[in-house]
């Protein structure tokens, strides 16, 4: 499992405490407007079972002022001279556990976006509102994670207590037996030792679960001894509609995010098309990987997402620092435009990372659930053939402890998936939190959250674009065989409305680019997987905009390479950013493609192992 289950989104709350607002950006205080302060009256007593909406309502209402003020204390950089790398390092140092690098990139992007908006916004009240919204969102995410952790903990603590009680009773009987007879048989000694180890392991798990409950109780300001949690599933927090693709969320972000709407009001074009083109021009590595068949299941693809997220964040931070340090009015205006451009790219990168985290956690969830099913089946089989020996008893006990570990992982992944999905909606511009809402009773806040989150899904469905393949009018099917045709198609953001214009030739200026981004990605694919290179089962020979090109390529390659004579090709249809591609692949159950792939590359044919 790639995600460790560390308190990832709690860390985001700590990270976001690096921001704030003031009217003069020197003495950082929030606006002296009484309406901006959430009056924290006496904490409402919990009654009945607590669901995740109540958890969010309490976490936000009872912690918002502290979080906002902490942000305000940390955002202003004062007169200090810092670099973009310094700021990124300070964010990455606020970390707990060994979570996925995708979270690192997302934290840095959050930092960069909030800092950029703080610097661009000149009205203090508007900056206050922006910080308020981000504080509330991060507290809500922390509440979702903590609620799921506590829900699982309370259930499993009872199960552990029942098991431990049985085991302690057996241990006590063995002790009494030793007192009566003065010694134990070798079998009894081994059994007693095994039980004591199992009890110790269960106590360690129990203590960790109790810590989760205590952390949750502190977040929502309740007595952890009186908690009763609602465990039913919540559609609007956990279901990912199949109609929603990355483009859906990015289009919605372009239409809804306040940062981009203000850019438009300031006269800057940050439309979906403009931002998407800038991403393709400056950061095309991930698209190259997608075209060539890599996805979230591949470490290389995850690494590409991380590198893009980090680079986008660094570029935005550099632009922000240049803008804030510039004194000349004309140059400052030019820098402001650059910040707006980089801000749009960073928001799209936030959406992309959260979208992929949803997919990654879904993948992890299927893996761990498959493992849980096998473990349960193994336990049932062992108990069915149970012979009653101490070895059999210990073996079943150890299997149950391993099952408990897997169930803990499942719970952590469920929480992280719910958080990733809700963060995705936040990144698209949907946020129900306001000072006026938080002045209400917890029940009113809870009911409004349920309505708002459900409405987010309705809005997303209405914005979901129809999938429509781009049509090319191409008469010559051989254009894709030109050297570096794929790089030319995407490199530097060039868009060839008529691929026939390439005519199988490479423009001279393109030939000079001997190390394109796609070539680097392909090289990285090889070097990053040396250990398993020859075990990879899929040999990809090319990716084409026309299926006929894949057919022609296969006929030619079969004649040139004897190893392919008896192979049956497959053509995968894939859609990348609205464009349909056809990948020519050959599969082998045992791999063994390394030598052939090297020959193909030396002969200037495309080749990727995956």
Image (cartoon, helix red, strand yellow):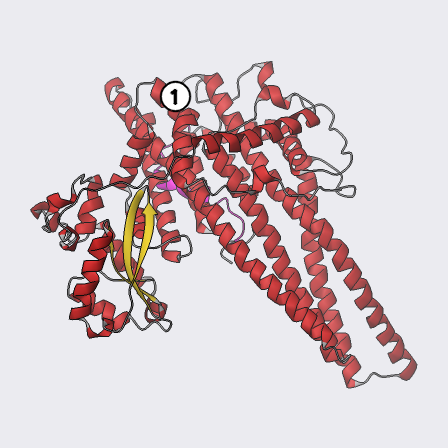
Coordinates of residue 106 in the picture (x, y in percent): 44, 42
Relative height, residue 251 to residue 421 (above, below)? above
Q: Residue 119: percent from the left, percent from the top?
A: 39, 25
Does 96 lie within the magenta span?
yes
Number of disc labels = 1
Q: Is residue 193 magenta?
A: no
Q: For residue 368, what is the image quadrant?
A: bottom right
State the residue at coordinates (28%, 53%): 582
Q: Residue at x 79, y 68 (%)?
A: 167
Return the residue nearer the eye: 319 or 576: 576
Position of residue 300 in the picture relative to residue 481 (left or right): right
Q: Quadrant of the C terminus?
A: bottom left
Query: Which residue position holds label 1?
Result: 262
Q: Which residues are magenta?
A: 78-98
| Figure check: 299 above or below 181 | above
Q: Nearer the viewer, residue 250 or 77?
A: 250
Q: Is residue 546 left or right of residue 134?
A: left
Left or right for 606, reference 398: left
Residue reaching furthest to the right? 180
- Residue 11 is situated, as x and y percent measured from the top left of the image, at 54, 43
User: For the residue carrying disc 1, how many other residues have a C-alpha within 10 Å: few (<14), some (14-19), or many (20+)?
Assistant: some
Q: Secondary structure at mark 1?
A: helix
**Residue 279 position (above or below residue 397):** above
In the rendered image, residue 187, in percent from the top left (x then y), is placed at 77, 83
Residue drawn at 68 percent across, 52 percent down: 209
The answer to whether residue 19 shows anywhere in this view is no
Q: Is residue 445 left or right of residue 547?
A: right
> Would you say residue 339 is visible in this rendering?
yes
- Residue shown at the point (24%, 53%) measured from the top left: 547
* Up-down relation of residue 483 to residue 18 (above or below): below
């Amino acid at each position: 499992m790639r995600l460790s289950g560390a308190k990832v989104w709690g860390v985001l709350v700590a990270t976001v405490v690096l921001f704030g607002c003031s009217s003069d950006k020197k003495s950082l205080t929030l606006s002296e407007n009484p309406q901006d302060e959430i009056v924290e009256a006496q904490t409402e007593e919990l009654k009945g079972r607590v669901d995740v909406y109540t958890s969010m309502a309490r976490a936000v209402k009872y912690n918002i002022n502290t979080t906002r003020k902490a942000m305000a204390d940390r955002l202003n950089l004062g007169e200090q001279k810092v670099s973009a790398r310094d700021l990124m390092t300070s964010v990455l140092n606020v970390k707990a556990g060994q979570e996925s690098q995708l979270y690192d990139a997302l934290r840095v992007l959050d930092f960069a976006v909030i800092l950029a908006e703080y610097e661009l916004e000149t009205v203090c009240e508007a900056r206050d509102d922006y910080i308020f919204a981000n504080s509330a969102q991060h507290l809500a995410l922390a509440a979702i994670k903590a609620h799921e952790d506590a829900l699982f903990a309370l259930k499993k603590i009872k199960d552990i207590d029942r098991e431990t009680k049985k085991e302690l009773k057996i241990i006590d009987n063995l002790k009494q037996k030793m007192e009566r007879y003065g010694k134990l048989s070798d079998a009894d000694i081994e059994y007693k030792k095994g039980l004591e180890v199992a009890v110790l392991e269960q106590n360690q798990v129990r203590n960790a679960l109790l810590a989760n409950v205590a952390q949750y109780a502190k977040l929502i300001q309740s007595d952890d001894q009186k908690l009763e949690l609602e465990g039913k599933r919540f559609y609007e927090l956990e279901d990912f509609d199949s109609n929603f693709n990355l483009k859906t969320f990015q289009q919605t972000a372009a239409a809804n995010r306040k940062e981009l709407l203000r850019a438009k009001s300031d006269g800057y074009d940050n439309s979906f098309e403009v931002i998407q083109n800038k991403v393709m021009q400056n950061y095309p590595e991930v698209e190259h990987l997608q075209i060539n068949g890599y996805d979230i299941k591949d470490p290389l693809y995850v690494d590409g997402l991380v590198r893009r997220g980090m680079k986008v964040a660094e570029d935005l931070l550099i632009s922000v620092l240049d803008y804030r340090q510039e004194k000349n009015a004309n140059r400052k205006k030019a820098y402001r435009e650059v910040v707006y451009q980089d801000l749009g790219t960073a928001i799209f990168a936030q959406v992309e990372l959260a979208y992929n985290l949803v997919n990654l956690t879904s993948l992890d969830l299927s893996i761990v659930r498959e493992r849980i099913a096998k473990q349960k089946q193994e336990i049932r089989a062992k108990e069915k053939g149970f012979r009653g020996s101490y070895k059999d008893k210990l073996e079943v006990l150890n299997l149950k402890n391993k099952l408990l570990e897997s169930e803990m992982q499942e719970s952590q992944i469920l929480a992280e998936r719910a958080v990733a999905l809700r963060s995705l909606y936040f990144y698209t511009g949907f946020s129900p939190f306001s000072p006026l809402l938080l002045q209400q009773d917890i029940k009113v806040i809870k009911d409004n959250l349920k309505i708002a989150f459900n409405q987010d899904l309705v809005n997303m469905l209405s914005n979901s674009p129809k999938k429509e393949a781009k049509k090319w009018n191409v008469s010559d099917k051989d254009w894709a065989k030109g050297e570096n045709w794929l790089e030319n198609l995407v490199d530097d953001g060039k868009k060839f409305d008529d691929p026939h214009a390439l005519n199988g030739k490479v423009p001279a200026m393109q030939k000079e680019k001997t190390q394109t981004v796609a070539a680097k990605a392909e090289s990285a694919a090889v070097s990053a997987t040396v250990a398993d290179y020859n075990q990879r089962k899929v040999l990809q020979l090319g990716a084409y905009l026309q299926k006929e090109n894949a057919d022609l390529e296969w006929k030619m390659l079969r004649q040139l390479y004897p190893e392919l004579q008896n192979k049956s090709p497959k053509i995968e249809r894939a859609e990348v950013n609205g464009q349909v591609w056809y990948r020519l692949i050959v599969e082998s159950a045992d791999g063994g493609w390394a030598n052939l792939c090297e020959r193909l590359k030396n002969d200037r044919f495309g080749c990727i192992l995956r």
